Image: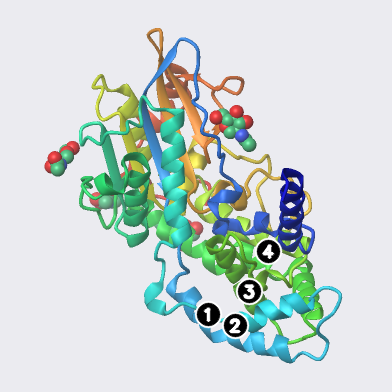
Amino acid sequence: MGFNTVCVLFLVLFYLGWSEQCSKGYPFEHYLGTRTPYRIVSNNSFHKIHYEGCTPKKVWMIIRHGTRNPSTSNIETINEKLPKIKSLILNSQNLPNDFIKNRDLDLFKKWKSSLDSEDNNLLAHEGEEEMLLIAERMQSRFPEVFENVYSNTTYKLKFTHSQRTKKSAYYFAAGLFGKQTAKDVWFPEPNKKDPILRFYKLCNKWEKEIKSSVKDRGEQKTFQETHFIEKVVEEVNEKLGLNELTISDISIMYITCGFETAWNKRSKSPWCTPFTEENLKVLEYMEDLKYYWQDGYGHELTYKQACPAFGDLVNHFDTTSAYPKAVIYFTHSGTLLKILAHLGLYKDNEALTASNYDSMSNRKWKTSLIDSFATNLALLLYDCSGTKKVLTLHQENIVKLPCCPDTDLCEFSKLTEYYQESIDRCDFEAMCNTSTINSSEF
Ligand SMILES: *[C@@H]1O[C@H](CO)[C@@H](O)[C@H](O)[C@H]1NC(C)=O
Ligand SMILES: *[C@@H]1O[C@H](CO)[C@@H](O)[C@H](O)[C@H]1NC(C)=O
Ligand SMILES: *[C@@H]1O[C@H](CO)[C@@H](O)[C@H](O)[C@H]1NC(C)=O
Ligand SMILES: *[C@@H]1O[C@H](CO)[C@@H](O)[C@H](O)[C@H]1NC(C)=O
């Protein structure tokens, strides 16, 4: 075969593969909320980042574990509900139709649940790869601070008390130093309730007054009663030629669509096929509402309590000691979101509520983008001819902090001035103490 023939053949195969992926003609992977795989949002560039006259000296990075398995309760619901829904679909007299084609039915035929409840929350293969790749790219962007030779003095690596963050840390280290060396990397014994990596576990007031109220009577719950959700339920039933599916059935289908998409780059989950793009946007909003009120801007205490973690960053950049160069923490969505809000990133002018779905369609607070698996935030300290400056990356993309809206590099003194209250008045015990008088926001 000549070069042209090979080329044409390749293009045809590429096109067929691509059109199969996008068979419903829209990017369903972009609306998966906190189950979005990192590859959808990552910046895959390996280019060295350079600012004239400046040298990177230190990094402080905080990372959500990579793609994982579902929680125990999700696994139980999947195993209980989905086989029943699958057989309803396969026995539906109204299928195939214009929306659910034979190839979608084939996907359902082949589907079975692969998880036991003991597999809950474990890091998935995709999560290993996410960590390896982030580490490799960060190292090639900033070789001065992500050294490729491991040393216990240069690196401070830490994970929370969980398999998924421990494994994430290992694969990240493997991306930096190779798998063999990664086995010898020293990690401190994880804390059950780490005051920096998972501060909110120590904040009784947040647990009692915010977390539980979001769950029991929050905006997400109210949104479930609106016509937006009613329409999703109606349309999904109609597409499948059924009438018995409820919002809780549809929620577990959406959750499974997310996980299976994250786990498998190449094959499509049947559970994604019954949704239109608009259906997924509504389900994504339901998810965003939960996290906005639980881990985001909804309540001041939620993000205020991130001050010990922010203080850890400031101390790392403030100290005259050159070591460790790299502080890297492996943690959870709840930490990442609270820190993003603490910094003032992705803040909308209006709060997300059950009644403003339409006007918030261009909101900044989209968990699919800001809280995917392996979500990460990296701050780099530069020395620019004696002036300390800070570069911020979220999902490996340069972001501008509110204190420096016009420049990538932000003077460290400007940053400490802007967040002065967080630095000077971080009385975690007092703000999280349930016997302290309720603040005015409640
Ligand atoms: C990725 O990051 C680089 C800087 O390292 C930037 O120039 C580029 O625009 C980013 N790519 C995307 C797709 O955002
Ligand atoms: C690594 O450094 C920490 C202190 O930062 C120390 O407690 C630990 O023992 C060291 N581990 C090894 C293997 O040297
Ligand atoms: C919480 O506040 C009460 C009353 O002000 C005080 O007695 C108690 O020691 C505080 N608890 C903590 C953990 O700070
Ligand atoms: C604080 O507010 C919550 C509800 O927002 C309430 O349940 C609780 O009793 C209040 N605590 C005090 C000490 O007033």
Residue 61 image offset from top left, x and y in percent: 40, 38
Amino acid tagged 1: Ser
Quickly name the residue at label 3: 253
Of the pair 167 and 268, the residue shown nearer to us: 268
Q: Would residue 440 be visible to someone looking at this image? A: yes
Q: Amino acid at mark 2?
A: Leu
Q: Using the rendered view, name the quadrant where residue 408 is placed.
A: top right
Between circles 3 and 1, the one closer to the viewer is 1
The span from disc 4 to disc 3 (Cα, nearest Å) is 11 Å
> 170 and 361: which one is in front?
170
- 394 to 99, vertically: above or below: above
**Residue 113 coordinates in the image, percent (x, y):** 52, 80
Report whether the residue tagged 1 is closer than 8 Å to ligand 1: no
Q: For the residue marked with disc 3, what is the amino acid?
A: Met
Q: Secondary structure at mark 3?
A: helix
Image marks 3 and 2: residues in contact by CB distance under 8 Å: yes
Render colour scheme: rainbow
Name the secondary structure under disc 1: loop
Rounded to the nearest angstrom, the CA distance separating label 3 from label 2 is 8 Å
Give the residue number, with chain letter if any, for mark 4: 283
Residue with the mark numbered 1: 113
Amino acid under disc 4: Leu
Determine if the C-beta at disc 4 is less than 8 A from ligand 1.
Answer: no
Ligand 4 shown in quarter: bottom left
